[in-house]
Image: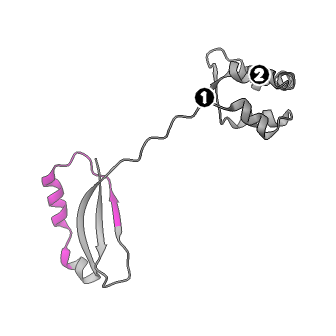
């Protein structure tokens, strides 16, 4: 659990609410009480602040996973719009791209893969065609 020390303005100064982030893990309530007592309330009051103590802070939510498409789906969609031959020529001219596309242990491609999107644009696909090829 993470905690944040909250120092609140009493209005006697122009300062806003000031959270002071402090990473505290594995502390008991007694430990927090001892930390609370370590801040001199009189010193804060002279500056126009009140100590609101430690409050628990929720961890940010994890990043959502990136969307993936099977490469076979992308290939089928390129064939359906008649653009596969242009992409095939690009792959043959660029061995690194060819190897990346035909790696057998990675059958998917990220729908937002910048190199793939740039390659599709480079062979003349319009934005709407690219969107249809990488649609989930």
Residue 120 appears left or right of 59:
right
Residue 113 appears left or right of 66:
right
Instruction: Give the residue at the far left of this rendering.
Output: 30
Residue annotated with mark 2: 98
Residue 70: horizontal and vertical position, in percent?
Answer: 64, 21
Comparing 81 with 113, the one in front is 81
Q: Quadrant of residue 20?
A: bottom left
Circle 2 or circle 1, nearest the eye: 1
Residue annotated with mark 1: 68
Magenta highlight range:
19-42
Q: Is residue 21 magenta?
A: yes
* 19 versus 103 height, above or below: below
Alpha carbon distance from label 2 to label 1 = 19 Å
Residue 94: horizontal and vertical position, in percent?
Answer: 82, 26
SS at circle 1: strand
**Residue at x-position 19% and y-position 79%:** 42
Quadrant occupied by the C terminus: top right
Circles 2 and 1: CB atoms closer than 8 Å:
no
SS at circle 2: helix
Instruction: Give the residue at the far bottom of this rendering.
Output: 12
Badge 1 density bin: few <14, some 14–19, many ≥20, Cα 10 Å? some
Q: Is residue 30 magenta?
A: yes
Comparing 67 with 9, the one in front is 67
Comparing 19 with 66, the one in front is 66
* 24 versus 128 height, above or below: below
**Residue at x-position 24% and y-position 83%:** 46
Q: Quadrant of residue 16?
A: bottom left
Residue 61: horizontal and vertical position, in percent?
Answer: 42, 44
N-term-proximal mark, 2 vs 1: 1
Residue 21 appears left or right of 117:
left
């Amino acid at each position: 659990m993470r905690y944040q020390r909250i120092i609140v303005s009493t209005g006697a100064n122009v300062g806003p609410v000031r959270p002071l982030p402090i990473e505290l893990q594995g502390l008991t309530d007694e430990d927090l009480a001892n930390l609370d007592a370590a801040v001199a309330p009189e010193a804060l009051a002279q500056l126009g602040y009140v100590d609101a103590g430690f409050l628990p802070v929720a961890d940010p939510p994890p990043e959502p996973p990136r969307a993936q498409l099977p490469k076979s789906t992308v290939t089928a969609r390129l064939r359906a719009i008649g653009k596969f031959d242009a992409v095939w020529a690009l792959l043959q001219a660029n061995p690194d791209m060819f190897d990346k596309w035909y790696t057998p242990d990675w059958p998917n491609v990220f729908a937002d893969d910048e190199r793939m999107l740039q390659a599709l644009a480079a062979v003349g696909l319009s934005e709407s065609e690219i969107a249809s090829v990488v649609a989930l």
